[in-house]
Image: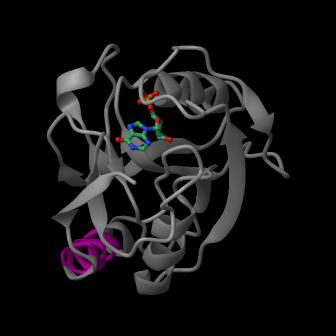
């Protein structure tokens, strides 16, 4: 059994999500954006975020290949489950749990842009800037974190730990 050190408590995460939701609600006043959650890691963040938004939103999900039981990116991204509806002409917000190398998000930005949304922006709860391999613009970021493998609050290691309420560092 691995040791777990708390990096961000449930309270800190909740506080920051409220701030992010306020900003997003202001920026999208009078609009009805489509929030695209990246499965599986972002489902906890997405569900907490939308309950603090005071604008109408639509929700869809897309699933991409993850690292499996490994902790480093292979760089190969595959769509495992696509969106249900067309995003053409919509104000789209990608909701991601963590940007690490940036390869996943880079692929998704390219892929979703080609479907002609009216606008496309990115929300991420966590950003590990030290490991970036491709540059991209993140429009809303919750926390910048050091280069450590984190679990909890929806993030897994080999499908374990998603249900932890705090975000923890996985010590091998
Ligand atoms: P990227 O393509 O390297 O930016 O990786 C993004 C994806 O890798 C995220 O959506 C997560 O699913 C996963 N990931 C990256 N870092 C971590 C981590 O520290 N813990 C758990 N999953 C991670």
Nearer to the camera, 108 or 103:
103
**Position in image of residue 62 (x %, y %):** 70, 46
Number of numbered callouts drawn: 0
Residue at 81% over, 46% down? 86
- Colour scheme used in the picture? one colour
The part of the chain drawn in magenta is 12-23
Is residue 2 found left or right of 145 in the rendered image?
A: right
Which residue is at a point 24% across and 36% down the rendered structure image? Answer: 128
* Quadrant, the C terminus: top left
User: Is residue 151 toward the left or the right of residue 58 in the image?
Assistant: left
Q: Quadrant of the N terminus?
A: bottom left
Residue 33 versus residue 45: which sits nearer the camera? 45
The image quadrant where one finds ligand 1 is top left
Above or below, 122 relative to 155: above
Position of 88 compared to 29: left or right? right
Residue 137's quadrant in the figure?
top left
Magenta-colored segment: predominant secondary structure: helix
The spot of residue 169 in percent (x, y) is 25, 51
Residue 81 x/y as whole percent: 80, 41
Q: Residue at x 42, y 74 (%)?
A: 29
In magenta segment, residue 19: yes
């Amino acid at each position: 059994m691995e040791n777990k050190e708390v990096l961000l408590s449930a309270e800190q995460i909740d506080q920051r999500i409220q701030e992010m939701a306020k900003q997003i609600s202001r920026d999208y006043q009078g609009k009805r954006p489509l929030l695209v959650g990246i499965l599986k890691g972002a489902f906890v963040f997405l569900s907490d975020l939308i309950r603090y938004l005071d604008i109408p939103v639509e929700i869809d999900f897309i699933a991409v290949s993850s690292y499996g039981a490994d902790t480093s990116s292979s760089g190969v991204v595959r769509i495992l489950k696509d969106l249900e509806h067309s995003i053409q002409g919509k104000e789209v917000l990608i909701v991601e749990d963590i940007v690490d190398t940036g390869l996943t998000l880079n692929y998704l930005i390219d892929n979703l842009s080609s479907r002609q949304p009216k606008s496309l922006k990115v929300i991420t709860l966590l950003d590990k800037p030290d490991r970036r391999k491709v540059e991209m613009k993140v429009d809303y970021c919750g926390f910048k974190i050091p280069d450590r493998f984190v679990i909890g609050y929806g993030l897994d290691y080999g499908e374990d730990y998603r249900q932890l309420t705090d975000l923890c560092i996985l010590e091998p």
